[in-house]
Image (cartoon, grey):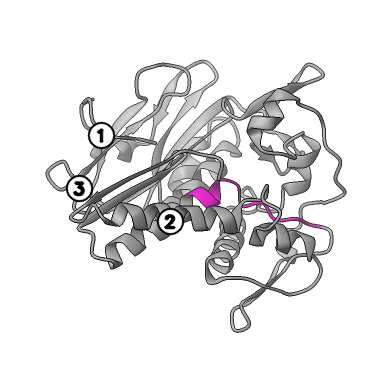
Amino acid sequence: MGSEAHVVVTGDARLLRVARARIDELERRWSRFLPTSEISFLNSHRGAPYPVSQDTFRLVDRAIWGWRTTGGRFDPTILGDLIREGYDRPFQALVLDPGSGVSVLRRNAGGIRTDPEAQTIELPSDAGFDPGGLGKGLGADIVVEELLAAGADGACVNLGGDLRVEGVGPDRGRWLISVDHPTEPRPAAMVALAAGGVATSTSLKRAWTIRGRRRHHLIDPETGHSLQSPAVAVTALARDAASAEIATKHALLADAGSELAALEELGCDGLIVTDEGRLEATAGIASFAVEETSGGDAA
């Protein structure tokens, strides 16, 4: 997933090994940069039903749900746009030698067909699937669910800023989450959760420049290019990390000034940071806020 993983387990530290193995397995299944991943095979078999694991079926099904729920703002078929913007290889390689890629793929999330009984996915012949941040969010959800099922009292899984917590936390049963500020060393917020998901999307990271134009990995489905918005970061709090990840895209792609309303539209609380460094939050975020401490997991 191209990100650092941070896992906290309460009750049985031996389950950390289980979590690491599961995260590695999801990476092998979902990375579009691994030629042997299920996502790579799915993209190479467009136009025909392709059998996938339960994990990958769940990922694609949730992506379709996100596309429908956000009216297309969250779109898992932006693979062609990402390639044309230059994100055609792992980010570490991209920043060393940035350059535009070539792809004939277009956006067509509505054309994805799923068969739950056969557990197959059929991509349109002209569209590719990119897990994007949803892979991190859903991955965190899956690992936390399985850790609790295996006997953990509580668990926190943070995959590159998409975080899920559940069960007994280390701070009086709660989980303290430090939300990174994209431009300052201080946290944007410190929140306490009994359970739920937190995700942050920002245009200030995973960015590169080609022929004088700054590009990044957040694609505007309306234009097919890197998003241009006065909001440079959105953090969402939701019942699970996958929902929070989808909500951040919904808010970032909302009309200027409507980002917080977009979060609330999906039943989420959260905050935004503007290109002027201004911090804005939903009214409900106050119920989660705590004074800054030295602990907590970053999201």
Tell me the quarter of the image containing the C terminus. Answer: top left
- Where residue 174 appears, as percent x and y from the top left, is 19, 45
Question: In the image, which residues are magenta?
Answer: 127-136
Which numbered disc flags the more N-terminal residue, 2 or 1?
2
User: Element type at marker 2?
Assistant: helix
**Magenta-drawn stretch contains 133:** yes
**Magenta-drawn stretch contains 109:** no
Residue 21: mark in rendering: 2
Residue bearing mark 3 = 169
Q: From the viewer's perspective, is 46 left or right of 15?
A: right
Name the front one of labels 2 and 3. 2
Residue type at mark 3? Gly
Which numbered disc flags the more N-terminal residue, 1 or 3?
3
Q: From the viewer's perspective, is 169 left or right of 128?
A: left
Q: Residue at x 83, y 63 (%)?
A: 125
Residue bearing mark 1 = 289
Q: Residue at x 77, y 34 (%)?
A: 85
Q: Residue at x 65, y 62 (%)?
A: 38
- Where residue 187 appears, as percent x and y from the top left, is 35, 24
Q: For this rendering, which residue is in front, 265 or 125?
A: 125
The CA span between labels 1 and 3 is 16 Å
Task: Please report contact status of discs 2 and 1: CB closer than 8 Å, yes or no.
Answer: no
Q: From the viewer's perspective, is 127 left or right of 265?
A: right
